[in-house]
Image (cartoon, coloured by chain):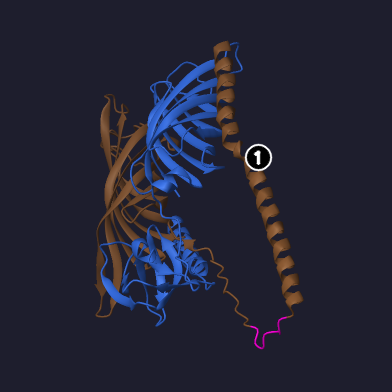
Chain colours: A blue, B brown
Amino acid sequence: MIRLPLLGLVLSLLLITAPAVSREREHLQVYITAPYLELRSGPGRGYPIFHVAERDESVQVLYRRTDWFKVRTERGVEGWAAQRDMQRTVLADGTPFKFDLGDRAGFTSHNFEMGIFAGSYSGSTLVSTYASYSLNSQLAAELSVGQFLGKYTNGVVGDLGLTHVLVPEWRLSPFLMLGTGIVHVSPKATLVQPTERTDQTAYVGGGVRFYLTRRFFLRGEYKSHMVFTKRNANEEVDEWKLGFAFFF
Amino acid sequence: METGIRVLLLTAVLMTLPGCASVRNWFHHRSEVRQAKAEAKEEAAQQDAQAAAQDADATPPRVVDPEVERRKIKVPHIRSSNVEIGINDGFISIEDFGTQNAYGLTAAYHITEDFFFLGEYGRAYAGRTSFETLGGNIQLLTSAERRFTYYDISLGYNFLPGETFIGRGHALTTAFYFVGGIGATKFAGDDRFTVNFGGGYRVLPSDWLAIHIQVQDRVFRTDLLGVSKLTNNMEASLGATVFF
């Protein structure tokens, strides 16, 4: 009963703050060199074309969603233009309008990566996700978090490390990983005297990534974790996973 | 243990070696810059010499000095609006435990016009099984164990994009979408690997606001009632999201 007003509150907060996000700002003006520029009602090829801007007219580029640009014509009509069509526009000084295309070249060199994985952590089912920031086309700092769900133990893992892509130009490109992390293990309650524990880990690993299309690639990897336990012997844990990722 | 450390060190060496390879051009890069600077200096010196020679020729000054200045365009950053964050509220039918209110948070990233990544987190509170209701004073689970918490990471696919019309002059863009993914459910004191799949309908009253109607099935294996079985937990919800 308390939740509903709370929901309403959050919703109205979102409603109030959201228009502030799309506040007026300096927009880029580009000129159409193709015979015309088609404007659609939504950011997708399935939405209808409702307006056409002519050659030599200018449009203001408001913002971008995936491969579509929201533009405003000289007459104040707002609509969505495709990336392919925007490539045929020029800036006021006549130079072509250039932007990030999200193609194979982007796969070789990009700023961010994110992905989701399914796999195995020491024999338990693993669900994990990662995000990485590229320092250059070969080296990236990477953060991954995951949860493993086994028959006898459950737990969460978090890793922070470096990834080195050996040959970023290749469609199927191998990479190496090195880093550190933590693992929190909680044995299932049915076992005698279950004790939860958190340990630091270090890992080395390797894998391959394979460019699919647009901004997507497949990524498979193996990590060998060394768990620094408080007991006499350290533990070695194998992690295998396969997943979908994209760059931007 | 020793092999582990050896592998660690070896990999460290392996990683740094290609790293060095990637910075090997820095030295040459500097030399190129130096060369370019030297060339620029030489050119300037030549121009000075030419100007001096022209002065020596003592040509009459031009009557009109053309002041042609190239327009410099500063390209402002084009904002991306691919992130969608929101809340939802609805019902979930927890197998054997009745249908209950469920509410949650969602975050999505739109990668292309067709595909998006979706992360969801939700909570519900399981009711009583019919066994408990009929058996009188029997409690299968404690109050804390009845807390049903789930999360998932999914991939979504938009299909049937279109428009819906309000009155004669107003159209809202819409799309149906499929989602499917993996995650975990915490229920009855245990975390279980969960597969989720379903679909939804998204209506956008404006470009930054979306209303969702969504139906998903969350499937996980449990042996809570004696035998190990797959349970289907259908969820229907209404949500609101904002694009950033």
Labels in figure, total: 1
Residue A241's place in the image compared with B201, above or below, is above
Q: Secondary structure at mark 1?
A: helix
Residue B21's place in the image compared with B69, above or below, is above
The residue segment tinted magenta is B59-65
- Along the line of sight, which residue is nearer the eye, A109 or B48? B48
Instruction: Find residue A123 and report its horizontal and vertical position in percent.
Output: 39, 21
What's the residue at 35%, 77% (across, down)?
A: A55
Q: What's under tag 1, amino acid-wise?
A: Phe
Relative placement, left or right, of B85 versus B127 is: right
Q: Give residue A161's quadrant in the image.
A: top right
- Along the line of sight, which residue is nearer the eye, B109 or B141? B109
Relative placement, left or right, of B30 versus B114 is: right
Residue ranking furthest to the front:
B57
Residue ranking furthest to the bottom:
B63
Relative placement, left or right, of A238 versus B34 is: left
| Residue A126 appears in the figure | yes
Provide the chain ID for the residue under circle 1: B
- Along the line of sight, which residue is nearer the eye, A211 or B56? B56
| Residue A199 appears in the figure | no
Report the predominant secondary structure element of the magenta stretch. Answer: loop
What's the residue at 58%, 18% (across, down)?
A: A229
Q: Mark 1, residues whose alpha carbon is within 10 Å: few (<14), some, or many (≥20)? A: few
The answer to if A159 sits in the magenta stretch is no
Residue A57's place in the image compared with A156, above or below, is below
Instruction: Find residue B171 and report its horizontal and vertical position in percent.
Output: 28, 73
Question: From the image, which quarter does the N terminus of chain A lie in?
Answer: bottom left
Instruction: Find residue B13 and report its horizontal and vertical position in percent.
Output: 59, 23
What's the residue at 32%, 50% (across, down)?
A: B91
Q: Identify residue for label 1.
A: B27
Instruction: Find residue B196 and report its horizontal and vertical position in percent.
Output: 31, 41
